[in-house]
Image (cartoon, rainbow, N blue to C red):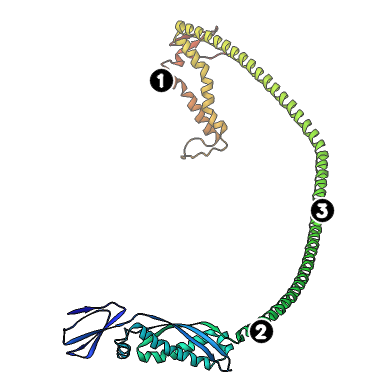
Amino acid sequence: MFFTCGPNEAMVVSGFCRSPPVMVAGGRVFVLPCIQQIQRISLNTLTLNVKSEKVYTRHGVPISVTGIAQVKIQGQNKEMLAAACQMFLGKTEAEIAHIALETLEGHQRAIMAHMTVEEIYKDRQKFSEQVFKVASSDLVNMGISVVSYTLKDIHDDQDYLHSLGKARTAQVQKDARIGEAEAKRDAGIREAKAKQEKVSAQYLSEIEMAKAQRDYELKKAAYDIEVNTRRAQADLAYQLQVAKTKQQIEEQRPAEAERYKLERLAAAEKSQLIMQAEAEAESVRMRGEAEAFAIGARARAEAEQMAKKAEAFQLYQEAAQLDMLLEKLPQVAEEISGPLTSAKKITLVSSGSGTMGAAKVTGEVLDILSRLPESVERLTGVSISQVRVSREGAVEPSCQIPVHVTE
């Protein structure tokens, strides 16, 4: 058959094929009926009220102590579970708790006997730690572990603790009064010191303020000096500039008058030049008109003359042409001899025969002039040698009489 148990319980199976017995904490196990046996043991935590009445301490003062302890059988440790099964298997929780309580009380009384009332009263933590340590080392051999131990109460029937309390209370009150006096003294000292520091701080602050005021006044005076200096320099510069400006104005007045005079003279001269130019232009215009009129009159006269010459040419033909040729012959002779008259130097190259020197040049000119009638005849077809001039100035053609020019 299968048997089960919760985590707060352990099962022990013994009998056929179970040597040593099987211990199961919180689980299941298979049991053969009739030939195997199953037993259970509680693993619950037990709370023990450990009282030790009228136990004499080290100085012989009887006191009563009450402590609270929590103990339990340790199921996770196989050795402790085996020891607990050997000692408590088949017992109830009450029986197990009574055994553990008797053990704890014995250790508690032993610890009380080795300590004074003052030590137990003043240092409860130390007492609890000693009881826990001694009881744990003994109960662990039974498979029981002490989970916790706390000192709950201490009292006596001789009012020792009350007297100790009074003394302590008086001491405490004394200490309180002393402490209060010392506190007041310290407070007074601190207050005086604080006032002194406050006054010192105030003086230092006033000194710093005075220094700051002094520095401010010095800097302000320096700034004022600098500002006044700059202002005086500016005023002086302004006055100098005003004086310079006045001087420049005074110097510029004659210059302005002279400039005005020159401008007026220039304007008058300009007006005069304009008037002269206009008069000259008018004169030129009138002269041009006169010249144009004269040229027109001369042109008209020449045109009339030319018309008359044309009429004469129509009447006399060759005689008129010859007359014109005779008028132009002196000009032709002048043009032929012109280069000779303007020449500064003549170089003659002789071939070794004929005349030499200036006579040679004269002969050359006369030779050119003697050839003019032939040239004219070739150009115009008029023979100068075949015409004669009448006493009235008319030119008549003739083939028998040579030409004679009379003045």
Name the residue beneath numbered marker 2: 167
Side (left or right) of 247 relative to 294: right
Residue placed at 45% from the left, 87% from the top? 132
Name the residue beneath numbered marker 1: 378
Residues under numbered marks 2 and 1 in contact, where contact means CB atoms less than 8 Å apart:
no
Image coords of residue 101 (percent x, y): 42, 86
When asked about the image quadrant of residue 164, the answer is bottom right
The alpha-carbon separation of the residues under discs 1 and 3 comes to 118 Å
Depth order, front residue of 155/238: 155
Judged by depth in the image, the label closer to the viewer, 1 or 3, is: 3
Q: Is residue 293 above or below residue 108?
A: above
Depth order, front residue of 219/16: 16
**Disc 1 residue crowd, few under 14, some 14–19, many 20+, Cα 10 Å:** few
Image coords of residue 335 (percent x, y): 52, 26
Residue placed at 31% from the left, 78% from the top? 8
Name the residue beneath numbered marker 3: 228
Q: Secondary structure at mark 2?
A: helix
Earlier sequence position, callout 2 versus callout 1: 2
The alpha-carbon separation of the residues under discs 2 and 1 comes to 189 Å
Image coords of residue 140 (percent x, y): 38, 90
Q: Secondary structure at mark 1?
A: helix
Q: Secondary structure at mark 3?
A: helix
When asked about the image quadrant of residue 219, the answer is bottom right
When asked about the image quadrant of residue 190, the answer is bottom right
Q: Is residue 49 above or below residue 390?
A: below
